Amino acid sequence: MSYSLNRFLRPLKANDKTIRVFDDRNYPVHTINPFSVLRIFVTNSNLNVALSGNRTIVLDFQSHEETKEALSKLQSFIDQLKRTSPVIVDKEIEKYIEKVIQINSSSGLSSLNGITSSNQSLVVYGDDNLDIAIDSKGSTHSITLNWSGILSIDKGGLNNTDFSEGELLISDSDRVISSGYTINDETISDNNLWTAGRIIKQISSNKVVFNVGDGQRDTFNLSHNLGTRAVIVQIFDVETGESVETEVVRTDENSVEVIFNKPPDIEKYCVVIS
C-alpha cells in the first residue's frame, strides 16, 4: 500500500475532529485522532505515526524528501485540530472514557463533570474511528457519537480495504473477500466478466476478413489481433460462396494458421475470423 503527498490528506472541514488518511487508490485507510498522536517521525521513505495504546501507523511514500514534506503537512493538520478542539482526558482506558476534566469555561452554563464550555469534544482511546462530542446548553447536555473509516468485522463491516470497483465478492466464513473476477467491459482478460451488452457488441463488431491464395503456398498465417484463442474461423469459396473444410490452427491469442491440401489460386478463398 503506497501514499502520495498530494493525495494522503484532504483539506480539513470546519466540523472535522479527526484526520482521515487516504492511500493512492483514494481509499480512506486510517483515521487519526490528533490527541492520540504521541510522535511522528521519518524513517527513510516511511512516515511513522506513534499513537497511544501502543499503536503505530506506517505510511510508505515514494522518496525520503516527499516523506519529510508529508510529516510537515500531517503535523500542521494535527496542530490545527488541537487548536480548534482542545481536549484533556486524564487517563487512558481501552475504548472508554472514565473521567472528563475541565477544559475551559463560559459563564451562564451548567457544567458536565467540570466542563462548562458550550461545545466540548472527548478523546476516545483504542478506537480512532469513533468521535464523541457534547453540546451543553444550560443544564441540558447532548452527546453525539460519530464513526468514520473502514468498518471492522466485529462491528458488522467487511474488514477489507483492498476491494476494487467492479469486483465480485464472496463470503469466506468470517469475512468478505474478492472472488478474483471483475466486471470490466473495456479489456479482454481471463479474470474479466462482461455485461450482456458488451458481449453482444463484441460478437457483432469483432470480425476480421482475409482473402487468401497466391497459387504457390498452401499455408497462411493470419493475424486477427482479437486478443483471444476463442475465435471462430469460417472459410468459403469467393466465386461460389460454398463453405470449405480445411485445417485451422489457433497459434496464439492474436493469429491463426490456415492449411490447405494444395496451394489455392489467387484470392480463391475468403477467411472470416470472429
Image (tube, rainbow, N blue to C red):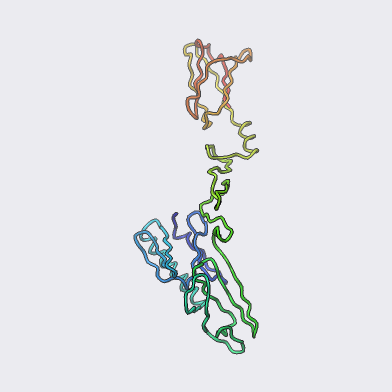
- How many labels, in total? 0
Quadrant for the C terminus, please: top right
Q: Where residue 173 appears, x then y in whole percent?
A: 56, 50
Please identify the quarter of the rendering in which residue 109 is found.
bottom right
Q: Where residue 203 appears, x then y in whole percent?
A: 62, 31
Quadrant for the N terminus, please: bottom left
Q: Is residue 83 above or below residue 159?
A: below
Q: Residue at x 59, y 89 (%)?
A: 107
Q: Is residue 138 above or below residue 11?
A: below
Q: Where residue 46 appears, x then y in whole percent?
A: 38, 60
Q: Is residue 59 above or below residue 130?
A: above
Q: Nearer the viewer, residue 115 or 12?
A: 115
Q: Is residue 255 above or below residue 164?
A: above
Q: Residue at x 51, y 13 (%)?
A: 260
Q: Is residue 207 left or right of residue 56?
A: right
The residue at the far left in this view is 44
